[in-house]
Amino acid sequence: MSTEEITTVVIGDVALIVVVSWLLGAAARRCGQPAVIGHIVAGIAMGPTLLGRLPGDPTERLFPSEVLPFLSVLSQIAIVLFMFVAGYEIDARQLRGGGRAAATVAVSALLIPAGLSAGAVGLFHGTFAAVDPSRADGRPFVLFMMVATSITALPVLVAIVRERRLTGTAEGTVATTAAGLMDVMAWLVLAAALAGTGHAPDLAWQVSLALLAVFTAGMFLVVRPLLGWWLGHFRVAVAHQVTVALALALGSAWVTASLGLHPVFGGLLAGLTMPRREGAPDPDVLRPMEQSAGLLLPLFFVTTGLSFNIGSLDGSGGVLLVLILSIAILGKIVPAYAAARVSGLEPRPSARVAALVNTRGLTELIVLNVALEADVIGRELFTVLVLMALVTTLMTGPLLSRIGPREQAPTKEKQIQRSERS
């Protein structure tokens, strides 16, 4: 294909992806699910799982191999911006002051599924090897499986908390803070798992981690104070602040990619580094970055869907899916509920905390794509884990509905009436 032909196809693909994702996202919201579920389904539907099975293989016609690198680049930029927003929204004060309940839930709901996954890789090695024979060994694979089953999708969780009107409640605060703690710890483990396996394979993983530590220290000890001083002492226009945020995100992503890690780590680090206004994210910076990421994110779901093919799964894949679902769901819900109860929450709020931290959504898909690109997992295991992410995210809403609405605190008049009756 010529450059003009590729440009034409890419423009048409972007238009198609945006429209289909918007329609299915709206349909998901009408069904009581987050819009991201509709976007994920749109990406899968346009891939070999559905559209590719129709006569003439429309998937190949719409997304020829020549245009995939261009769509992939755009999707990676979207993920870098998304991770910047995720890091920028993390409130360090909340993580420090989330209380014993959040810390207990975070430790339990992270370590137990991670430990179960590590044990399962060793105990059921033949099952993993049957699905991914060339990769089911070694430090990166084990560490990745620990992260894949234990991570929580903080952005999706926050959206569900808002939709269910749990913001400010004990269960909403505990779940949100615990998810933030778990995500920080999980990304650190993933960085250790993927060090030396990505864009700079000539670097040993120990060297990659050491250089990453130096870069991280420089971002927090040098870049952040300088940006804070500049933004605080000069009347910087909003457009310039957004430009700085964009340059910081992309520049940091370039550095982490050069160190042998994925660009998403740089985006997350940039978000954590970006100075805040009085301890909170500046809405004038957050909003345009969030909107930019949101516009491009459907491209990421399509590139994910093109790598997802449920028809490639055989009996071994089905057995592995059941095993991973058991670890991912029971390993999250049971310890999270127990930790919340031990910390003093009542049964229903504890059940809501457990249901919320079990959601994975977009964050899980980012982790899976990072591992697929780094060749830590193959496409069949990728498909199994995408199905796990879909199931655990889809079940969150029905679980919360099953638990029931939050109990309303009795009003003062009702308290007086009760005391008079007694």
Image (cartoon, rainbow, N blue to C red):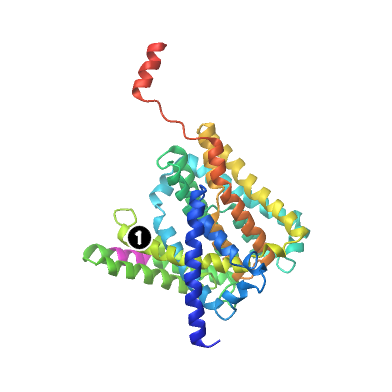
Determine the image quadrant of residue 62. Answer: bottom right
Q: As rendered, which of 69 and 344 lies closer to the eye?
A: 69
Residue 413 position within the rendered picture, expressed as x and y whole percent measured from the top left: 34, 21
Question: Does residue 124 appear in this view?
Answer: yes
Residue 407 position within the rendered picture, expressed as x and y whole percent measured from the top left: 46, 31
Please say whether residue 288 is one of the residues in the magenta stretch: no
Residue at x 70%, y 67% (from the top left corner):
135
Q: As rendered, which of 335 and 421 lies closer to the eye?
A: 421
Query: How would you rate the neighbour count of disc 1 (Cα within 10 Å): few for under 14, some for 14-19, many for 20 or more?
Result: some
Determine the image quadrant of residue 221. Answer: bottom left
Farthest front residue?
55
Specify the quadrant that holds the N terminus. bottom right
209 sits to left or right of 228: right
Residue at x 59%, y 57% (from the top left corner):
147
Three-letter code, disc 1: Arg
Which is the main secondary structure of the residues drawn in magenta? helix
Please say whether residue 223 is one of the residues in the magenta stretch: yes
Disc 1 element: helix
Question: Does residue 63 appear in this view?
Answer: no
Residue at x 48%, y 81% (from the top left corner):
7
Name the residue tied to disc 1. Answer: 287
Q: Which residues are magenta?
A: 220-228
Residue 192 position within the rendered picture, expressed as x and y whole percent measured from the top left: 57, 64
Q: Is residue 255 above or below residue 320?
A: below
Specify the quadrant that holds the C terminus. top left
Residue 358 position within the rendered picture, expressed as x and y whole percent measured from the top left: 57, 47
Q: Is residue 392 above or below residue 70?
A: above
